[in-house]
Amino acid sequence: GEDVEQSLFLSVREGDSSVINCTYTDSSSTYLYWYKQEPGAGLQLLTYIFSNMDMKQDQRLTVLLNKKDKHLSLRIADTQTGDSAIYFCAESPLAGGSYIPTFGRGTSLIVHP
Amino acid sequence: KAGVTQTPRYLIKTRGQQVTLSCSPISGHRSVSWYQQTPGQGLQFLFEYFSETQRNKGNFPGRFSGRQFSNSRSEMNVSTLELGDSALYLCASSLGGRSYNEQFFGPGTRLTVL
């Protein structure tokens, strides 16, 4: 079955690093994603990683993938108040000719000044 | 390039009524997916349309249906509304080819069922 789990809340101080963790169950997942949702808005894809990669870095964002443990993490360096949002982890195998992500429940990141 | 647009943004209905939500994808995108977001169940996949055909379907009852037009615009319909259908309905579009294509999400339609 498919299940993506992540902690519900994370609180950090501005300027610190944030690490959001996620575990998934579908070993056939080809792509793993991190999305961001701000209040009143839809989801914005932050970054994704292909399953044969261990790490991906994009400016302040670092994604680490441990495929053996089915563990995905998102590190945000120098966290700013504007990073306060809900962060969703998602996985997707190829199904029916497309990649449909299965989402976790989301982690609310609260950044204190 | 305009993003994904959804109309209406907010909707209030009563139990037993039906509702139609609309999604206009990014120009050139042929795939449209629909998701339901609730505090209790999180984000759940409803269905995906590609070139006017339903390509994937989630685990929702038959009261939830959709369609896609030749211009790739999509509608979803919920009949005989229940209180539990209150949710944020998100639409996402992508190019839709067989290789990975990023999904772009609209702002959603907030449906409240009274």
Image: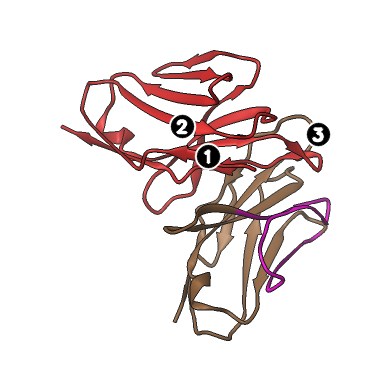
Q: Which chain is home to disc 2?
A: A
- Horizontal placement of B97 versus A42: left or right? right
Classify A16 as above or below A99.
Answer: above
Snapshot colouring: by chain
The residue positioned 55% from the left and 37% from the top of the image is A90
Answer yes or no: are tags 1 and 3 on the same subunit: no
Q: Which residues are magenta?
A: B45-69
- Horizontal placement of A3 versus A10: left or right? right
Residue closest to the far left: A113
Mark carried by residue A22: 2
* Res. A83 image quadrant: top left
The residue positioned 53% from the left and 22% from the top of the image is A69
Q: Quadrant of the C terminus of chain B?
A: bottom left
- Mark 2, secondary structure of its residue: strand
Name which of mark 2 and mark 1 comes first in the sequence: 1
Q: CA distance from mark 1 to mark 3?
A: 24 Å
Mark 1: amino acid: Val
Residue that badge 3 annotates: B98
